[in-house]
Structure formats: C-alpha cells, structure tokens
Image: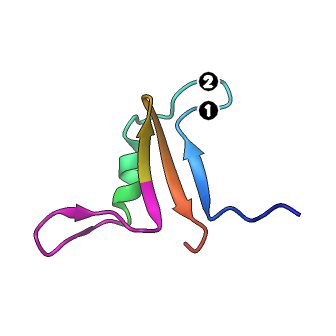
Amino acid sequence: MFEVQPEIVIQDITVSGETFRPNDWAERLSGMLSVLSDDGYLACSPFLKPIMTRGVRYVAIDREL
C-alpha cells in the first residue's frame, strides 16, 4: 500500500501549461487562514503554506485541515 502523504500540494501550472490567474492566488489562499501576530506581523497557518521555487508558486495544505 502507498503511505498517505502529510500534505496536498497545489502547483501554479495548469494541465495546459499556463499559470493560474490571478498570479497572487497562493498568497490570497494562504491569507484566508493567516492572523496578525502580537508584534503586528502576518503569521501563516501551520496548515497552509505558500511556497515559491524556481518561479513557480505552490501551496502545501496539511491533510488535517
């Protein structure tokens, strides 16, 4: 059997090879679960993490969410 992965990863590239629109979709999605910390900084949820690698955006979503 396959081991269950701890996260689901959404990549910024469609099946046809185009990038998602709007281009800040990962930040918008991550912002939905973000909160302001006591010192005034935006803190992302541990369940939803935006990632950028080699110019491609990803969002890693914890399966517990």
Name the disc covering residue 14, or none.
1
User: x%, y% of residue 45?
Assistant: 38, 67
Magenta span main SS: loop
- Outermost residue toward the top? 17
Based on the picture, tell me whether residue 44 belongs to the magenta stretch: yes
- Residue at x 43% of width, y 46% of height: 51
Secondary structure beneath label 2:
loop
Name the one closer to the observer, 5 or 22: 5
- Outermost residue toward the right? 1
Way the structure is coloured:
rainbow
- At label 1, the amino acid type is Thr
Do labels 1 and 2 touch, CB within 8 Å?
yes
Name the one closer to the observer, 22 or 5: 5
The image quarter containing residue 14 is top right
Name the disc covering residue 4, or none.
none
User: x%, y% of residue 44?
Assistant: 33, 63
- Residue at x 44% of width, y 29% of height: 54
Which quadrant would the C terminus be assigned to in this image?
bottom right
Which quadrant would the N terminus be assigned to in this image?
bottom right
- Residue at x 60% of width, y 60% of height: 7
- At label 2, the amino acid type is Gly
Quick one: label 1, few (<14), some, or many (20+) residues within 10 Å? few
Q: Is residue 27 above or below residue 22?
A: below
> Start and end of the magenta stretch?
34-49
The image quarter containing residue 40 is bottom left
Secondary structure beneath label 1:
loop
Q: Which residue is mark 2?
A: 17
Residue 21 placement, left or right of 16: left
